[in-house]
Image (cartoon, rainbow, N blue to C red):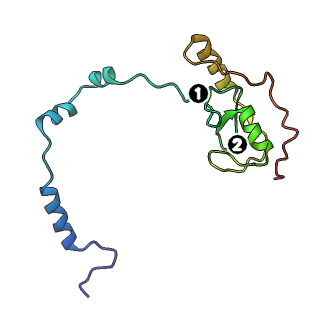
Amino acid sequence: MDGTSDWMIPRSWHSDASKIEGNLPKPSSASKKKNTATADDNLQAAPEPEPPNLRCPICLNTFRRPVATLCMHIFCDECIYDVLRHGSLSCPLCRATITEPPEPDTILDRYLEQMIADGAVAAPSGGRSSPYTWRDVSFPQQ
């Protein structure tokens, strides 16, 4: 036995790593200049924040009456209703079991209304005018 445990890294590995590090290219002066940007430069170069994804992952259109599942995924209530009504009681994104009707996301709904009014987002087309009652979906008992 050489006195080392199985969990210890052999000394030969350390010397091999230093050989590899010695062969890495040195940063150029141009890349050093990039790293010396001031905080003001970074603020000016920062891109505009992108708006949140406002499209339903099922229909790929702008949300219409967004609802949130217990797993916190958001869908149009018509889209998730159709999925649940046809027997799949799992989230289409993460496959978590959906045990109760999704809750309306009123904050996102108001945000969407404002974005549509400002012309930043296209209004959803079609759909229904009132939320589903969810009576014809049988959720598993907890």
Vertical position of residue 141 compared to residue 34: above or below: below
Q: Residue furthest bottom?
A: 1
| On-image quarter of the N terminus | bottom left
Residue depicted at 21% across the width and 34% down the height: 35
Identify the residue under disc 1: 54
Residue depicted at 12% across the width and 56% down the height: 23
Q: Residue furthest top?
A: 118
Q: Dot 2: within a 10 Å radius of its alpha carbon, few (fewer than 14), some, or many (20 or more) residues?
A: some
Q: Residue furthest right?
A: 135
Residue type, label 2: Leu
Vertical position of residue 9 compared to residue 51: above or below: below
Q: Dot 1: within a 10 Å radius of its alpha carbon, few (fewer than 14), some, or many (20 or more) residues?
A: many
Residue depicted at 66% across the width and 22% down the height: 124
Quarter of the image where one finds residue 48 = top left
**120 relative position to 109: left or right:** left
State the separation of the CA atoms marked 2 and 1.
19 Å
